[in-house]
Image (spheres, rainbow, N blue to C red):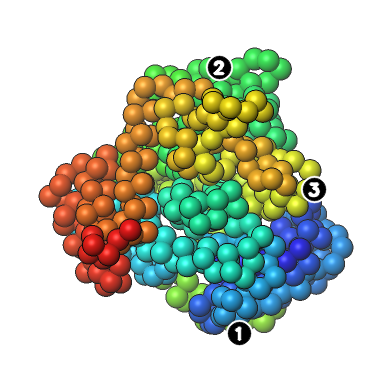
């Protein structure tokens, strides 16, 4: 199988390669093609892959020894050459790079609004840049590898996936490790750890970075209520510590970690403003110094990258943790996205089914034909909307599993944010500045027409390409 990674110079690409050469996914890919617009980044990541211990016949830290042949690795800056013959495409692109992320955060913070890369104002700005780039990739896929699957890591993952469905249909699947991480951590804390790739008894509904674990059954009994009443068990994993126990008891569910920005908006915004630099600035500084060193580091390239990776993981969601509070060692070990992506890839190839939380269209098809054969996996959200739910994955793609109707407050928040997402997709797809302004105005973390106007103007100043995106209404379909 030939795998192409768009954004092949990305910092997390070595995690994918590590999973491909060790453990259960070894032998799944015969050729790995890394595509990136930046040849310097490609050279740096290539150096890391060559220096990875398992590539020399030894297992990478924390992983089983490699089995079978190592995939050949090819790099290119030509998108068409990269796509030619691809069976699966992983996409993790960041138009504007880490400097763009910094602007996403800083423009929002300068106006007193939460500055986060995927949530709220920063997420809308990021989507306005990433969706056009991903639409170009999807269009090229239809020409050069029409049978290929696109597994989308590009953030904001839900919005980007929704924008690509009209082009690729069921051939696009969005992934994120946040929801799956919550489920597996909660299951361990409840004393009923789940096998990887199995979600029996799990109830989860949401959008990307906006979801809730509402059921956790084992042996026919829902363990979640007991977990929510157990302070010591909650203290044993990040989401349990992140939210007040009274809040968890009130909603009767465990929120995705990104809901901290909604339930603790004031605390989050204040903590971000108190930090000496934004998360984007920290990552931009780290990578600006690291990448040139990697390309010439020889056998030390992997060690340099892994040290930087661990440092980066230590700073994740720092605004949500108290002074001196450290992340769990399992999280610091790295990995998540790549295991989900490769599990999807293996299931698509026909090598066994998998159950995974994915971003896909909110439609469950009944075996019986006729009216009513299709219904929403998450009742209360549009059937054609992209949602984040447990799915069964096989050669025909990702099939969402039916979920309970969300509680009123959870459903209202999802409906409101989904409306914002669809306005953003429309703005980026059809070049509508009015839709972009409406998205900023309607977002519950902004909720102000005046602030929305200033946000959009600020992002247009930071990203001149946005001005080129807008088209007169007469020119839009």
Q: Residue at x 55, y 30 (%)?
A: 374
- Mark carried by residue 351: 3
Picture coordinates of residue 309 (x, y %)?
56, 62
Image position of 277 with respect to 371: above or below: below
Residue occupying image coordinates x 69% and y 53%: 345
Up the image or down, 9 lies above or below 408; here it is below
Mark 3 or mark 2, whichever is nearer to me: 3
- 313 or 135: nearer the viewer: 135
Q: Residues within 10 Å of mark 1 (few under 14, many from 20)?
A: few
Distance from disc 2 to disc 1, alpha carbons, whole Å, reads: 53 Å
Residue 442 appears left or right of 160: left
Q: Tell me the element at label 3.
A: loop
Residue corresponding to mark 2: 226
Q: Nearer the viewer, mark 3 or mark 1?
A: 3
Callout 2 secondary element: helix
Q: Quadrant of residue 283?
A: bottom left
Q: Position of residue 27 (x, y in %)?
A: 81, 60
Precedes in sequence: disc 3 or disc 1: 1
Q: The N terminus lies in which quarter of the figure?
A: bottom right
**Residue receiving disc 1:** 296
Gap in angstroms between the C-alphas marked 3 and 1 = 39 Å
């Amino acid at each position: 199988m030939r795998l192409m990674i768009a954004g092949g110079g990305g910092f997390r690409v070595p995690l994918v390669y590590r999973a491909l050469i060790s453990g259960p996914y070894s032998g799944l890919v015969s050729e790995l093609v890394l595509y990136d617009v930046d040849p310097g980044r490609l050279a740096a990541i290539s150096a890391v892959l060559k220096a990875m211990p398992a590539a020399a016949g030894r297992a990478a830290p924390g992983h089983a020894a490699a089995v079978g042949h190592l995939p050949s690795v090819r790099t290119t800056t030509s998108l068409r050459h990269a796509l030619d013959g691809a069976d699966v495409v992983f996409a993790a692109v960041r138009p504007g790079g880490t400097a763009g992320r910094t602007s996403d955060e800083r423009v929002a913070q300068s106006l007193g609004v939460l500055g986060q890369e995927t949530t709220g104002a920063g997420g809308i700005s990021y989507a306005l840049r990433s969706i056009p780039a991903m639409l170009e990739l999807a269009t090229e896929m239809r020409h050069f590898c029409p049978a290929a699957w696109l597994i989308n890591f590009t953030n904001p993952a839900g919005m980007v996936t929704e924008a690509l469905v009209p082009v690729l249909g069921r051939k696009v699947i969005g992934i994120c490790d946040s929801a799956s991480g919550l489920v597996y951590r909660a299951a361990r804390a409840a004393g009923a750890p789940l096998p990887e790739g199995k979600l029996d008894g799990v109830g989860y509904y949401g959008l990307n970075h906006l979801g809730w674990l509402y059921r956790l059954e084992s042996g026919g009994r829902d363990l979640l209520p007991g977990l929510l009443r157990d302070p010591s068990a909650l203290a044993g994993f990040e989401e349990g510590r992140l939210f007040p126990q009274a809040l968890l008891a009130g909603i009767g569910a465990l929120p995705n970690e990104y809901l901290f920005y909604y339930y603790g908006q004031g605390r989050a915004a204040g903590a971000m403003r108190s930090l000496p630099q934004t998360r984007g600035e920290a990552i931009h500084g780290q990578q600006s110094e690291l990448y040139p060193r990697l390309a010439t580091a020889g056998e030390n390239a992997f060690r340099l990258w892994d040290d930087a990776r661990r440092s980066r993981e230590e700073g994740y969601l720092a605004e949500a943790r108290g002074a001196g509070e450290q992340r769990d060692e399992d999280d610091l070990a790295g990995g998540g996205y790549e295991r989900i992506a490769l599990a999807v890839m293996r299931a698509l190839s026909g090598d066994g089914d998998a159950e995974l939380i994915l971003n896909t269209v909110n439609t469950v098809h009944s075996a019986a034909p006729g009216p009513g054969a299709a219904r929403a996996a998450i009742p209360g959200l549009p059937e054609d909307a992209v949602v984040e739910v447990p799915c069964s994955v096989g050669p025909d793609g990702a099939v969402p599993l039916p979920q309970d109707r969300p509680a009123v407050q959870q459903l209202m928040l999802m409906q409101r944010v989904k409306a914002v997402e669809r306005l953003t997709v429309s703005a980026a797809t059809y070049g509508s500045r009015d839709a972009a302004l409406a998205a900023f105005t309607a977002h519950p973390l902004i909720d102000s027409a005046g602030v929305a106007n200033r946000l959009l103007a600020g992002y247009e100043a930071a990203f001149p390409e946005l001005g080129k995106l807008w088209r007169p209404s007469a020119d839009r379909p």
